[in-house]
Structures are given as C-alpha cells and as structure tokens.
Image (cartoon, rainbow, N blue to C red):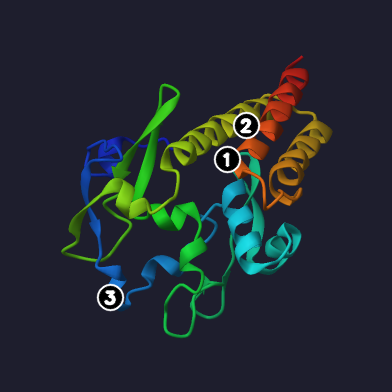
Amino acid sequence: MRRDVSLEEISDGKLYEVNDMVKADCQDCAGCCDCCQKMGDTVILDPLDVFRLSRGLHKPASQIMEEYLELDIIDGNILPHLRMAGANEQCMFLNEQGRCSIHDIRPGFCRLFPLGRYYKDGGFKYILQTHECKKQNRSKVKVKKWIDTPDLKSYEKFVNDWHYFLLDVQEILYNTEDSQLIRNLNLYVVKQFYLKPYEEDSDFYQQFYERLDEGKKLLALAEN
C-alpha cells in the first residue's frame, strides 16, 4: 500500500532478503499478545489468507468474511481485514489464554510481523519495523524461518504480483469520478479474488493467476 514515509522513519534502515538474519524473534511472544489487540483495520488479508482460513476452518469464504473479517477502504481499494472485538479490541482468533487459535493458518501479515515489506522497482525487500513490537531483547532469526510459509518462492511472487495489481486498480480508482466504475471495480476484486471459491484439491497459485489474468484484461478495458 502507499506509505509516504522514509525507510528510516519506520525501520532500522536496512533491507533484508529471505536468507538474511534479522532481530525479530520474540521467543514465541512469551505471553505477550499486544500485536493481536487494537490493530484497527491494519491486518489486511490477501486472497491466500482467506483461502487458508476457509480450508482450515472448513467454512466457505463468504462465511469467513461474515464471521471474522470486515471490509474497509484501504488506499482506495475495498479489502478485508481481521475484525477486532470486545473491550480489548482484540483479534477474533485470540483465545482466553491470549494465544492465537489459528496459528498454523494465520494470515501473512501475522507471519511477517514485526517485519514489513518495502516495495520498489517492481519487487520488494523485507524491513524490520522498529515501532511495532514492544518486545525487548529480540534475538536473530533467518527471515525465511520467521515467515514460516511453504513454497516461499511462489508465495513471494504471489504477494508481489497482488501488491502491484492493487496499485494498478488504485490508479484507475483515483483517476476517475465515475462512481459506478469505482463500485463495480471494487466489487469485482472482492468477488473474483476472495469470495469466488478456490478448488481445495488444485494448486491455489495456478487458480489465482488465472483470475489475475482476467483482472488485468478488465483493467485494460477500464483504462480505455
């Protein structure tokens, strides 16, 4: 998403790759769940996140969206984020012991935290956000181990392509005053990439890229 801040303001100023060591390991949080509370609309989910939740919880994506997520405008796009609930405004998946009840299928945002991604020139590097995690004395861990995601190469390509596709969508949304086009394009993204079921027995990435190709064709038509 768009961030009008310098790298030094939000991180330690370094750019990391998957085999680099980074001071992010908080020793399994050791009872802390601050990053699961009062996060507002910041824990944004991508299509793979919703697919994982749907498959892991044995519920259709529409039910996942209704029970655990909220839709909000994020930099022009309407996208789903984790719902915060209760007096502590905490994640819907946080249990009574303050632990994540869906840790194996947790969203990519949660896997990454307190790391972030710095997008530039059509790609991205990882950064260590310095103002996000309150845990002190974190130890070093390899980036790819911390992210804990199968088939990391395919995942990184997906994350990158999804990010830049959303930027292309934003450009159209920001440069039009046609309210009907804005509504239709936002509804298309939600329905096509989140709500339309993915076949669980087929490769997610292949299905995603088939939809992405269709989405890019639609954007080309919308620009003309």
**Mark 3 or 1 closer to N-term?**
3
Q: Is residue 95 above or below residue 193?
A: below
Q: Are marks 3 and 1 in contact (CB under 8 Å)?
A: no
Tell me the kind of residue under disc 2. Gln
Q: Quick one: label 1, few (<14), some, or many (20+) residues within 10 Å?
A: some
Residue at the image position 48 percent from the left and 78 percent from the top:
88
Q: Pointer 1: what residue? A: 75
**Residue 207 seen by the camera:** yes
When the figure is inspected, residue 176 is found, relative to residue 104, above or below; the finding is above
Say which label, 1 or 2, has the lower sequence index: 1
Q: Residue furthest right?
A: 180
Number of labels in the image equals 3
Determine crowd level at label 3: few under 14, some 14-19, many 20+ residues with C-alpha closer than 10 A.
few
Q: Give the image location of residue 210, x and y in percent.
A: 69, 32
Tell whether 190 sits left or right of 149.
right
Whether label 1 touches label 2, CB < 8 Å: yes
**Tag 1: amino acid:** Asp
Q: Which disc, if any, is residue 170?
A: 2
Q: Which mark is residue 30?
A: 3
Q: CA distance from mark 2 to mark 3?
A: 39 Å
Q: Which residue appears farthest toward the bottom when viewing the image? A: 96
Q: Going 49% across and 61% down the picture, which residue do you hit?
A: 106
